[in-house]
Image: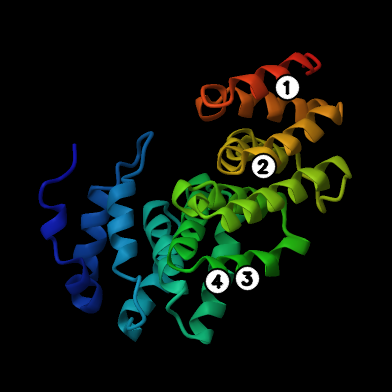
């Protein structure tokens, strides 16, 4: 149940006062939902929004950079998202630091920290999609599998896909990633990292296809026609999503009929 006092707690006041940092840390940790199956996403989002502005004091910035390096889960989870929320408003020096934080988080061994990077990309896109596109384009050529998964999860965000141009960009990036898998272009292959990337592909493609159905189904058709068991599994998973099966039953049934059993 949501804490009724959450909206009245003076997060910004605590952020700005070093003496209040232990109080802020205790507040977030106690309401983190951890250990448990679900972290408190709403509280992390509220904290992140406190940084979605250009005027962030050095004190508030130092708090974030310190928390991003913590060994636990929830404080880095909050800090990475807040850094990303600030990215579109930040100066060049802070942007450079945030880029490093995001890249580190995308490759982190802790899955919640990796998830915070994906959510962070969504913040960047919501505030300024061209800035997100510039950021992803700078990383795409040498992206690791974990980074590619973060790209997909970041773009698979319905508010970002309402724009036709943004949906086309997302679909194009997904096509590039799946093409790279088929062509064996991924550097430093790791079975666990590929599993994580595959899980991202198994749901994200359906959002891109729903937003841009003509080009999207053409992409799924190409993947299915590849005969690659990995791609067939990914296509089947996406076709099972109600956003496609209910709205485009004819296209879904036609693709499923031609798929090889896995």
Q: Which residue is mark 4?
A: 131
Label 1: how many Cα within 10 Å (few below 14, some 14–19, many 20+)? some
In the picture, residue 169 is in which quadrant?
bottom right
C-alpha span from label 4 to label 3: 5 Å
Say few, some or many: other residues with alpha carbon within 10 Å of mark 3 (under 14 / 14 to 19 / 20 or more). few
Marks 4/3 in contact by CB < 8 Å: the verdict is: yes
**Gap between marks 2 and 1, in whole Å?**
23 Å
- Lateral position of residue 226 relative to residue 46, left or right: right
17 or 88: nearer the viewer: 88
**What residue did someone put label 1 on?**
255
Please name the residue shown 27% across and 52% down the image: 43
The residue shown at (47%, 85%) is 91
Residue 194: name its quadrant.
Answer: top right
Q: CA distance from mark 3 to mark 2?
A: 22 Å
**Please, which colouring scheme is shown?**
rainbow
Q: Which mark sits nearer the N-terminus, 1 or 3?
A: 3
Residue 212: x percent and y percent? 61, 43
Total numbered badges shown on the rendered structure: 4
Mark 2: secondary structure: helix
């Amino acid at each position: 149940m949501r804490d009724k006092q959450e909206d009245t707690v003076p997060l910004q006041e605590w952020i700005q006062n070093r003496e209040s940092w232990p109080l802020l840390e205790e507040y977030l940790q106690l309401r983190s939902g951890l250990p448990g199956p679900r972290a408190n996403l709403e509280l992390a989002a509220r904290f992140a929004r406190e940084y979605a502005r250009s005027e962030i004091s050095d004190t508030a910035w130092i708090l974030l950079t310190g928390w991003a390096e913590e060994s636990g889960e929830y404080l880095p989870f909050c800090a990475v998202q807040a850094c990303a929320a600030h990215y579109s408003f930040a100066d060049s020096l802070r942007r450079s630091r945030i880029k490093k934080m995001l890249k580190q988080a995308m490759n982190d061994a802790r899955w919640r920290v990796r998830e915070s990077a994906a959510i962070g990309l969504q913040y960047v896109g919501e505030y300024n999609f061209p800035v997100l596109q510039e950021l992803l384009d700078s990383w795409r050529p040498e992206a690791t599998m974990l980074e590619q998964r973060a790209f997909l999860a970041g773009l698979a965000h319905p508010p970002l896909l309402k724009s036709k141009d943004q949906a086309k960009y997302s679909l194009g990036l997904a096509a590039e990633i799946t093409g790279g898998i088929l062509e064996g272009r991924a550097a430093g292959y790791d079975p666990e990292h590929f599993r994580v990337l595959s899980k991202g592909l198994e749901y994200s493609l359906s959002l891109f296809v729903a937003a841009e159905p003509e080009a999207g189904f053409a992409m799924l058709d190409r993947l299915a026609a590849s005969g690659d068991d990995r791609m067939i599994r990914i296509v089947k998973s996406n076709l099972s999503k109600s956003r496609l099966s209910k709205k485009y039953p004819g296209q879904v049934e036609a693709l499923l009929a031609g798929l090889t059993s896995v």
